[in-house]
Image (cartoon, grey):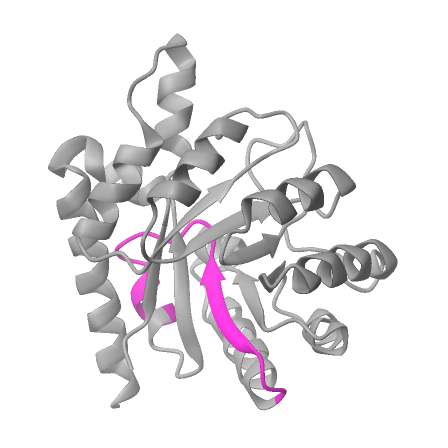
Amino acid sequence: MPIRLHINIDHVATVRNARGTSYPDPVFAAQLCEQAGADGITAHLREDRRHIQDRDLERLREAVVTCLNMEMAATDEMVTIAERVRPNVVTLVPERRAERTTEGGLDVVGQRATITKAVAACQRAGIKVSLFIAANEADVRASHELGVEQIELHTGEYCHQMAPHELERLRVAAGLAHALGLEVAAGHGLTRHNVIPVAGLPELVEVNIGHAVIADAVFVGLPEAVRDFRAALERGLALRGG
């Protein structure tokens, strides 16, 4: 089965906001990605609105015809917005104002009460919920206990170190999650090159690619960058046959 390719278009908004213009438009970028074969669009509405804005999310909901995945912190403000906009999926992520980008997975065990409240509200609204977590047994099991449909494994340490033991950590976590009945996604720091071994994990059904595909698009254009990532995923899938 093909791996779903979701493209995060946050950094199109980053470029736009740097000059306070109306371009480049993240909604148009999302449409180009879909036309190039993306299976979904991801957008992170952060508390400080550093890239995606509320109106962007509303327009994305109107324009996206595949799957709209809203990344967000587990706060009352964001839950209220999700209930109104109704993305197909909400991915709960940790968030700190001082961070450059999301630096790790949710502390599902330590923040259980807060996350439980957000999960329940989103599910009541008919929204699929995914939790962005580190590849460890405790958070995988806690995610399962919360009744979410999916986890997204944080691949940042793997991408930073490119070490066999980090890929093994992902492998073990993906296997456990699958055994518990959870869908397994992966994301953070993945490029056309380092995504291939991750795509070889048999339990993986989805990746979320953001910064790298927008960076590639500077040189080859957005549609070609999306197609290049699709080709990389296919190379990873071929590893499963071995």
Residue 236 location (% of width, % of height): 27, 73
Residue at 54 percent of width and 24 percent of height: 50
Q: Where is 216 relative to 122, above or below?
A: above
- The quarter holding residue 78 reads top right
Residue at 52 percent of width and 76 percent of height: 183
Q: Is residue 227 left or right of residue 52?
A: left
Magenta range: 180-198
Residue at 58 percent of width and 68 percent of height: 151
Q: Quadrant of the N terminus?
A: bottom left
**Does the magenta segment cover residue 227?**
no
Q: Where is 200 relative to 119, above or below?
A: below
Q: Is residue 124 left or right of residue 21?
A: right
Q: Where is 105 relative to 219, above or below?
A: below
**Does the magenta segment cover residue 197?**
yes
Residue at 22 percent of width and 80 percent of height: 238
* Front residue (pair 57, 124): 124
Visible in this render: residue 170? yes
